[in-house]
Image: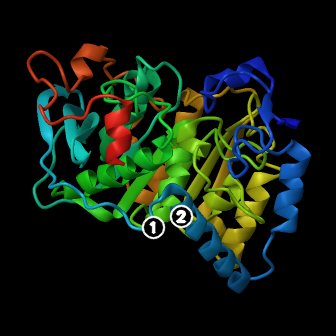
Amino acid sequence: MIIKRRHFLQSASLTLGAFCLPSSTWAIAGDEPELCRGGYFTEAEGKAFLEQHTPTNLKAWNKRSEQIIKQIKTGMELNKMPAAPTLAPIMHSKKEYNGYTIENVAFESLPGFYVTGNLYCPAELTAGKSYPGILCTHGHDGAAEGRFREQTQRRCATLARMGAIVFAYDMLGYGDSQQCTHTIKKSLKLQTINGSRALDFLLSRAQVDAERIAMTGESGGGTQTFLLAALDKRIKVAVPCVMVSAHFFGGCNCESGMPIHKKGDYQTNNVEIAALTAPRPMLLISDGADWTKNTPNVEYPFIKHIYTLFQKDALVENVHLAKDVHDYGVNKRLALYPFLANHLGMDMNLILNKKGEVDENKSVILTNQELRVFNAQHPIPSNALQGDEAVMAQI
């Protein structure tokens, strides 16, 4: 049996996000030959891959795009999306704050499996007026926190104060989503289904404008963002934060646990997948402390080239924060707000203080218990699947 060293990144600062595998840097060659886990490429290999796969014209890219999308769907076992249960959301505990409201929400993505989250809305929804809708995902930090993290609450509340209807939802095994563990083998498939159903829920809100839908998340939530944007054209604007990398594929089953990147001689990476968003507006947010440290010089030029083929290069941007770390911290949120305001038609003035600065202080940080959907007063429905085996059998 041959032991092959995989190129997993070693920096301690990189334990923050897209890894949920053991820290070992060794893998047995042949045990999962079509899975591209973690730092599957070296940085040099990732750069060379993009150079070798840079299309010379739009026809070539469209042909490549079809191939990439086909393997994503095949690798996820989602050539046909399973039938959606009737949308009958559980909604309760509406809370009103300065400029926005929050409700606790759950709905079925598959029979017996519930997506859990919070719906943030502008405080006063004007009759007859339409509003942009935004899906907000989160990364792997803090399984007990998930969508409850302060950075996620501030992001969602501020976007609602700007005039958007925002839905933040849990990764598997995080927050309220405790019907299975996060590391089930087909978590990538289930989280993609959950994202699609979350989009269904958002679009079911009467005043959400289907032409102004965005999605954003950090780390593993960034992976969810560019994957769903690649597969679902209903997402009109995408902001994957601290995740798009030429050499790093995500170390968790929910990112690289199914063969979406490799099949036989076929190979892609997350940069090509993120480029499938083109020509819809996209902002790449990167930092200097993780696998996005090369974005201005490696990943962004490739993606901008794809937008240039569509003659839409003005619709893609990169904000690189060389001194920042792997999170959705304040500097990244300050990059997010004007980009979404510009492309979704929102009013930045609604969140500025008298000095013209973004003021997030009106965002009230709530406890986990206040944001939970399921509790003693609102128990999880009796048909809910329980345990990894039951959930895996359903998907």
Q: x, y (%) of residue 166?
A: 31, 43
Residue at left offset 80%, top offset 27%: 25
Residues at circles 1 and 2 in contact by the CB criterion of under 8 Å: yes
Kindly state the secondary structure of the residue where label 2 is placed. Answer: helix
Q: Which residue is mark 1?
A: 79
Q: Between 391 and 219, which is closer to the camera in this rendering? A: 391
Q: CA distance from mark 1 to mark 2?
A: 6 Å
Residue, far front: 1
User: Is residue 365 toward the left or the right of residue 339 in the image?
Assistant: left
Question: Relative to 369, does residue 102 appear above or below in the rendering?
Answer: below
Q: x, y (%) of residue 247?
A: 78, 46
Crowd tier of the residue under label 2, counting other residues whose Cα lies within 10 Å: few below 14, some 14–19, many 20 or above = some
Q: Which residue is mark 2?
A: 74
Q: x, y (%) of residue 277?
A: 56, 64
Q: Residue flagged by tag 1: what amino acid is it?
A: Asn
| Color theme of the render | rainbow
